[in-house]
């Protein structure tokens, strides 16, 4: 069964992609900006704080209600649809974490 996206899942992804270029801190200087894509609709959402300001890393709080499946007692986003994937936007294109890491490897070669 598909797993919903949570902050814990984002933390695991950051550990998995550390050192590969697949995290914000390692690819920001190359113009990559954190974002999410909903595979069901193919809509890409930039990562934002709850108030709508662009975030420097992946945050669930700025995602719209149509992808949110759970909130905590304080109203913060606790989980989003399993069809939502974290990644990056660069030059108008969405990259998965894997694709961003691959792009950075190619640029460094």
Image (cartoon, rainbow, N blue to C red):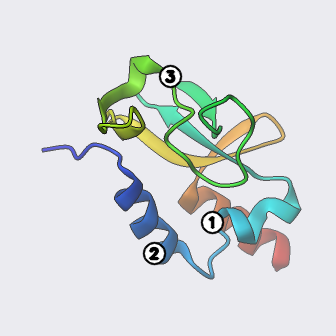
Q: Position of residue 96 (x, y in %)?
A: 56, 51
Where does the image place residue 95, in percent across and percent down from the top left? 63, 48
Q: Secondary structure at mark 2?
A: helix
- Comparing marks 2 and 3, which lies closer to the viewer? 3
Tell me how far mark 2 sits from mark 3, CA to CA: 26 Å
Position of residue 70 measured from the top left corner of the image (x, y, whole percent) = 28, 32
Q: Quadrant of residue 69?
A: top left
Is residue 35 depicted above or below 67 in this figure? Answer: below
Q: For the view shown, which residue lies furthest in the front direction?
A: 74
* Residue 27 percent location from the top left of the image: 76, 65
**Foreground pick, 7 / 23:** 7
Q: Which residue is mark 1?
A: 23
Query: Which quadrant would the N terminus be assigned to in this image?
Result: top left
Q: CA distance from mark 1 to mark 3?
A: 22 Å
Q: Is residue 40 visible?
A: no
In terms of sequence position, does the residue under pointer 1 or pointer 3 come before the other?
1
93 or 31, which is in the foreground?
31
Q: Quadrant of the C terminus?
A: bottom right
In the rendered structure, the answer to whether residue 22 lies left or right of residue 17 reads right
What's the residue at 65%, 55% (across, down)? 57
* In this view, 58 is above or below 45: below
User: Which residue, given by chain and number where applicable, does mark 3 sit on?
Assistant: 64
Which numbered disc flags the more N-terminal residue, 2 or 1? 2
Q: Earlier in the sequence, mark 2 or mark 3?
A: 2
- Quadrant in the rendering for residue 47: top right
Badge 2 density bin: few <14, some 14–19, many ≥20, Cα 10 Å: few
* In this rendering, position of residue 9 left or right of residue 88: left
Q: Residue at image x 40%, y 68%?
A: 12
Q: Which residue is mark 2?
A: 16
Farthest-out residue, left: 1
- Does the rendering let one see residue 48? yes
| 40 vs 105, nearest the viewer | 40
């Amino acid at each position: 069964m598909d797993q919903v996206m949570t902050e814990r899942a984002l933390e695991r992804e950051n550990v998995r992609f550390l050192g590969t270029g697949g995290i914000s801190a390692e690819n920001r200087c190359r113009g990559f900006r954190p974002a999410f894509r909903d595979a069901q609709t193919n809509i890409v959402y930039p990562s934002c704080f709850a108030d709508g300001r662009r975030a420097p890393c992946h945050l669930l709080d700025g995602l719209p209600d149509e992808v949110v499946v759970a909130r905590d007692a304080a109203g913060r986003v606790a989980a989003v649809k399993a069809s939502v994937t974290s990644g990056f936007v660069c030059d108008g294109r969405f990259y998965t974490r894997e694709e961003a890491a691959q792009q950075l490897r190619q640029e460094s070669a």
